[in-house]
Image (cartoon, rainbow, N blue to C red):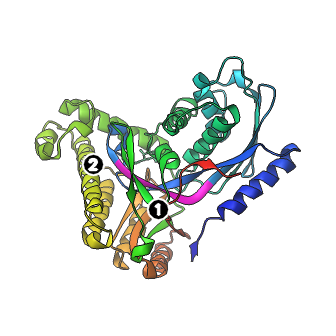
Amino acid sequence: MLSTAPDRARAAQRVEEAFAQSFGYSPDGVWSAPGRVNIIGEHVDYQDGLCLPMAISHRCFAAAARTPTDRVRLRSLQSDVELDIDAGELAPGAVEGWPAYVAGVLWALRSFISGSATQGMDVLIDGHVPLGSGLSSSAALECATAEAIESLLSLGTTPLERVKAAITAETEFAGASTGGLDQSASVLSRAGHALFLDCRAFSTRPVPWDLGSQGLALLITDTRAEHSHVDGEYVARRADSERAAELIGVPTLREVPFEQLEEALGRIEDDTVRRRARHVITEIRRVKEFDGLLSSGSVRDHLAELGDLLNASHDSLRDDYEVTVPALDVAVDAARAAGAHGARMTGGGFGGSTIALVEAEQAEAVAGAIAHAFRQQSLGEPVFFLALPSEGAGQDR
Ligand code: GAF
């Protein structure tokens, strides 16, 4: 019942061979970047908040070679859509579909590329992060590309500069308004760890998150629920949270101390905007508490409290932020009823995936209970994975 990601080494070899078949010569290398789940800290990155994501073992691979021209040719094993364009023609709005997330990274890195250097390259993508699952397949695509371009053009960028280029590619070139959580997790995560991300300072630190050695597991349920109106709703939530900050009189909701929650909320008349603010301010507090618990003992030592924080995060996203859909709520409720210590939606919401903190030996049974609940509610067939904390972006071959 639990599916697994393809073996990394074999996947890298597969895309290398596919490149040779597609372009007729061998690539200079293969690079990859992972998808992510966010353990806690949802819909707070664009309010300077705190998040705790981790990379998963599903990765996006890019086989690539530099060419002596300015021609950029992009192909994918997942799509018939291709791009063949002069690097000088890259501009926001000039490229559509998946190639925008790749070409956008080259465009975003332009200030690092010396004027005389050619920018031509051939790239073949093989993505294994499930699409439309809320597991950040687009960030994985951007971040694998950033690694490839860094190596091919010897740019000398830092990992943080590559994170920023990936964010710019997504927000300015592809035109998707997102907050930076996904790209940070995809580049900066370490195996066996979660990533504590402070979006105000743009600083990170690894947090030990070795569930396996404690007999625990994080079960991902990809609900396969269709993302409908996802972009418009995401933009609307951001606008609500910005309005809330304006009404409270702070640049971002991060600046509201939790102790002043009630006083701050009292300055917002509109019930919807008030609830949006309550979610963001309480969610940032939950991340602090979660992180505090992890630094004062093992996950096993604090299971009940950590589970309660996961549950409270989901309930706040459902009731105050209103970004869940029935499939997410059913998966979470079924996981809790089947004995999960805590469960919540992960990512942007409006479809996508949930996570549940479970005893490792019960993961199959919890997945079975969720699948059963889905059948009862005619919700289609979910897909289950274990979230194994994996390494961020890097070179494979
Ligand atoms: C999406 C966005 F891309 C992230 O930046 C973040 O806002 C997330 O939704 C919600 O936490 O994944």
Judge from the rendering whether residue 241 lies leftward or rightward of residue 96; answer left or right.
left
The image shows residue 224, relative to residue 198, as above or below, that is: below
Residue extending furthest toward the top: 115
The image shows residue 46, relative to residue 348, as above or below, that is: above
**Residue sitting nearer the eye, 132 or 19:** 19
The residue that mark 1 highlights is 192
The residue that mark 2 highlights is 284
**Which residue type carries mark 2?**
Ile
Place of residue 322 in the rendered image (x, y in percent of width and height, measured from the top left): 34, 52
Q: Residues within 10 Å of mark 1 (few under 14, many from 20)?
A: some
Residue in the image at 25% along x and 43% along y? 277
Element under disc 2: helix
Highlighted magenta segment, given as a residue range: 51-59
Judge from the rendering whether residue 308 lies leftward or rightward of residue 74; answer left or right.
left
Q: Which mark is residue 180?
A: none
Tell me the quarter of the image containing the N terminus.
Answer: bottom right
Please tell me in which quadrant of the rendered image residue 81 appears: top right
Element under disc 1: loop
